[in-house]
Image (cartoon, rainbow, N blue to C red):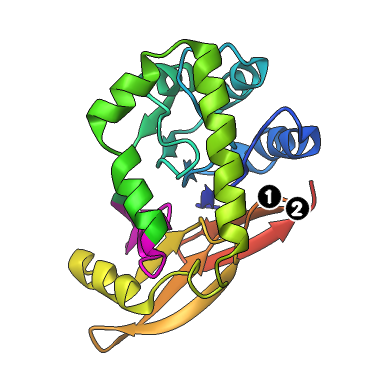
Amino acid sequence: MSRTLFIADLHLCQEEPAITAGFLHFLQREAQTADALYILGDLFEAWIGDDDPNPLHQQIAAALRALPLPVYFIHGNRDFLLGQRYARACGMTLLPEEQVVQLYGKAVLIMHGDTLCTDDAGYQRFRRKVHQRWLQRLFLALPLRLRQRIAARMRDGSKDANQHKSAAIMDVNAQAVSAVMQRHQVQWLIHGHTHRPATHPLLVNGQPAERLVLGAWHHAGSMIEVTPEALTLIHFPF
């Protein structure tokens, strides 16, 4: 059966071995028969550079490289520094933050999803700052241990800030969704980031459309399966 799989928001880290084990099982079983695998960001909880010798990164790279199918990656807000060196180690192709893919006669827009959360003005300002290339180059030139400390402080700051934000602010903005789908002239959008798995029917240019949101891998796996017949959000145990 022709099928393409999408995942996001695994937030892999050494402190969550059950999620890592679940992902490896997914790669060995579920992904083997797919036409392609798309990872829509936040594969890792944090990324401080391709030179990080973390054994978990090497384990994941080997598992992805062993897949008999193409793997594609869009950066998330946690792993936006993941570079070509690590992508080559994984055998995966890096994609831009917005990409239209043609799947079984359907044009599907894929993205991480954080750029759709336009009501969170503070986060969008922070995002614009850390996506400046000169600042990224400066950060990556720092010693590894210093980068680790900076990343830890930033994660703690992000958790504190999010505790004081309303749920609505951290979700996508409906006008931003409509605008990006109209710009790319698509009727289907797949993204992650919000950790609110669901399928949302909507209208784009007066035509029926769908926005499908991937879930985070907290206690179970989440994927979207695209076949010639349908786009389906699926949850499964680790």
Mark identifier at residue 217 = 1
Mark 2: amino acid: Ala
Residue 121: % across, % down: 36, 63
Question: Is the residue 75 above or below the residue 209 in the image?
Answer: above
Mark 1: amino acid: Trp
Left or right, 87 with reference to 151? left
Element marked by disc 1? loop
- Frontmost residue, 138 versus 171: 138
Categorize mark 2 by other alpha carbons within 10 Å: few (<14), some (14-19), many (20+): some
Magenta-colored span: 99-121
Residue where numbered disc 2 is placed: 220
Residue 79: % across, % down: 47, 35
Name which residue lies at 42% across and 75% down.
210
Categorize mark 1 by other alpha carbons within 10 Å: few (<14), some (14-19), many (20+): many
Is the residue under label 2 in contact with that under label 1 (CB below 8 Å)? Answer: yes
| Magenta run includes residue 230 | no
| Magenta run includes residue 112 | yes
